[in-house]
Image (cartoon, rainbow, N blue to C red):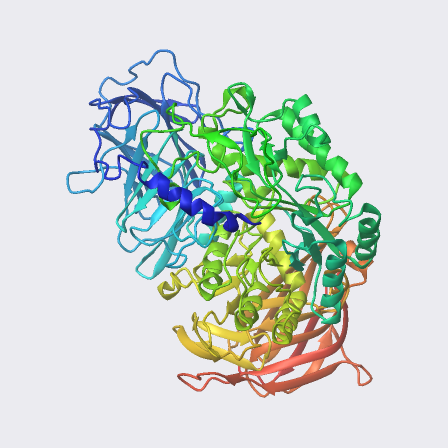
Amino acid sequence: MKSSLCFFSFLLALLLCILSANSSSTPPTKIGKGYRLISIEEVDGGILGHLQVKEKNNIYGPDIPLLQLFVKHETEDRLRVHITDAQKQRWEVPYNLLPREQPPKLKQTIGRTRKNPIAVSDYSSNGLIFSYSADPFSFAVKRKSNGETLFNTSSDESDPFGPMVFKDQYLEISTKLPKDASLYGLGENTQPHGIKLYPNDPYTLYTTDVSAINLNTDLYGSHPVYMDLRNVNGEGAAHGVLLLSSNGMDVFYTGTSLTYKIIGGVFDFYFFAGPSPLAVVDQYTAFIGRPAPMPYWSLGFHQCRWGYHNLSVVEDVVENYKKAKIPLDVIWNDDDHMDGHKDFTLNPTNYPRPKLLAFLEKIHKIGMKYIVIIDPGIGVNSSYGVYQRGIANDVFIKYEGEPYLAQVWPGAVNFPDFLNPKTVSWWGDEIRRFHELVPVDGLWIDMNEASNFCSGLCKIPKGKQCPTGTGPGWVCCLDCKNITKTRWDDPPYKINASGLQVPIGFKTIATSAYHYNGVLEYDAHSIYGFSQSIATHKALLGLEGKRPFILSRSTFVGSGHYAAHWTGDNKGTWEDLKYSISTMLNFGIFGVPMVGSDICGFYPAPTEELCNRWIEVGAFYPFSRDHANYYSPRQELYQWESVAESARNALGMRYKLLPFLYTLNYEAHLSGAPIARPLFFSFPNYVECYNVSTQFLLGSSLMVSPVLEQGKSQVKALFPPGSWYNVFDMTQAISSKDGKFVTLDAPLHVVNVHLYQNTILPMQQGGLISKEARMTPFSLVVTFPAGASGVQAKGKLYLDEDELPEMKLGNGYSTYVDFFATTGNGTVKIWSEVQEGKFALSKGWIIDSVTVLGLGGSGKASTLEINGSPTNANSKIEFNASEQKHLNSVEDEQKSVMVGIKGLSFPVGKNFVMSWKMGISG
């Protein structure tokens, strides 16, 4: 939304904080002597042990003397290692928010099952081996197939880190890493060096309302997970590591080691065996929750702005997109529709309900949708029904027995406590009431880190208006005093909060405030947005039985099961355009595949050239939305004719690809597979693509290679080994045996998008709204390795009644199609295998054309057969062939032809077979 605007006042306050921030700015590199294993036994399908501290010290507080170790292979490819206080329950991510197995209950007495535990022992599944050393205790995780060590906490004198540390407010553990390991993840942050983790860059995890323009800083989400990709003898193998903790942490990556320093909670590690990057994400999302299914319309283009002052402006925006012939599915309101910035209200002057309802009826008829924002802060106002009902139901986070007072856009606010079941019910009721007032199609939950314009313990000032109604609304006007009296507000170890070691309660809820059942904000801080997403999802699901659409700024492990994400307040700069790709790709790894950045930048004004290039990238974000700041000039895509042309071109292709994108959405929901992926997901053996952060894949085979620099009309792109075909001009191909960089022409209105060999891509004819685009005829694009024979191609298509809550086969409202193609012995054959075709047949969908790329020979065909019968002379089917041009033709002057077949009428819901003979070497 608008947090970046308040960042300037934030910076001023930071200067005051730095002086007092951290007496431990140069902490000791090694603390204590670690723990020894004093007992071990088999329990509940796992192993249970106890650890005793070897030598006590008081650095960052006293050690916890006795720990409980629980290890279990929960599946063949997932290993859990859980370490906690053996005598006292500690904070963990709530099991009702993120469902998972409970570790064994703490024992009242600790028996020595083995008086002399063996020095090293192995505990293995099909995928992973857990081994441990007893004194000092350390553990390692190895891949069973080859014995490679994936994680190793042992330390010796030469290591820069020490043994495991476990105190009440300071936990430390490290792992050795090989130099050639490529790591990805640990977010949310803006990474200037690209998607691959960069040695000695800071990685701090603590949800914070800090603009995404700030590099290497803890931003809106917390995802303490990484993927490790290694290439041994030409074979790439990946695994994943999750430390499930909501407590603030610093993670130090040196290139040869990784150290966690956490200010509370427990060690709760999950290891995912992979070995492919896709398998890692599959295993990870099987644990944290599969990504939410998205409605079809959400894959269309979205337009938003903070500053659509009244309804007539919104109506003009919709009309101008139509006039410019630029696709648009969803129109959004930031808080302009609200009465005094208050949630679940309408401004009666600027957004009068009768006129808004008439507008919504008009756009809903043509298939467009409407989404509005809600912030978690509820305005403190005795005449405001939402607040009254919140007080009556006792739903707010407390401080010393009273609702904690903060300030956000309405002025003084209280924050709902989404860990409280009563709050979840109250929130659902408020959403229901608002939906009766305005039939919105989704909700945008913002400022949920949670953001606070003030810090500390605040009161409403007497005798002055707060806020004044003039000037920026993000300046604190409550009467506040700092809270430093508890160890929760001023912990012994200072994480690198906001990149400057500010107090962890700065510009958020005081960390000594408490939630339901006495849970401290100190522990629950980073799950606030996650818990709000769950409550909002439950509320929307209960409204009309439709598939919910929620966009959340703050995210945590598992958020993708409920919500989409945008990358927050970015800047209209070339650097931010480039950074957006890495952040998008990271969220695919985090299990949040529906993600995108504000196209053209949130603020300040982008240049015309930048906006051209940004829509050429943003048209291929999974979540594609233009959004701008109140104080920026208008930047809708029709504001410049040149940008409108680029938008028609790039979004025109997106709308043709909607069935493909929707099928990727289905795959994401089934297996976690990211919609947008790094190149190494499809080419894990090809080391050259391990740090490619300027190109990306949609699915496994559609590669986007955009221009990301000012004044450029060419782009240097990496093409992994094989044949690639330009989807905008399918006569153009690029092939190589070993992969190569190719310089591509990219004039202002051109974005390079290439389709890989062995693929069948379903497309439609596009349109200005997804609803109309969805009813146009299908075409198939089939790609073979250029000139090859004896090869095959595959593709798939998922179709359903997209607003039903569940995305699945078997309900009578969905169809799934596998497509296959082969070429060999002079014959090309293409066919489909349909599951549950009734739904597709009821919609009347047909395939009217097929294009085959990469064929060898002349392209001349004979005896075209359809479903076993030759076509006759009177058939309307047209068959044409043209030679393809291979850019940077290599080795043996690659040659191939493109064959197009039009005039078909295959029902999507029925199996078909088509084949023909032609001059192909086989």
Residue lying farthest left? 157
Q: Is residue 591 left or right of residue 52?
A: right
Residue 305 horizontal/vertical position (percent) = 64, 56
Residue at the image point whose x is 40% and y is 72% from the top? 739
The correct choice, above or below, for 350 with respect to 912 in the image is above
Q: Is residue 570 above or below residue 174?
A: below
Residue nearest the observer in this picture, 40 or 20: 20
Q: Is residue 737 visible?
A: no
Along the viewing direction, whichever of 40 and 614 lies nearer the viewer: 614
Question: Which image quadrant is residue 538 in?
Answer: top right
The count of marks equals: 0
Q: Which residue is situated farthest in the front direction here?
A: 463
* Direction top: furthest residue: 109
Residue 699: x %, y % from top left: 55, 60
Name the residue rendered at 38%, 61% in the picture: 691
Residue 357 visible in the shown view: yes
- Compared to residue 35, the image places residue 652 above or below, namely below
Relative side of 393 to 126, left or right: right
Q: Quadrant of residue 159?
A: top left
Pick whichever, 87 or 347, lies toward us.
Answer: 347
| In this rendering, position of residue 460 left or right of residue 154 | right
Q: Position of residue 622 (x, y in %)?
A: 58, 57
Residue 628 percent coordinates (x, y): 59, 58
Quarter of the figure with residue 135? top left
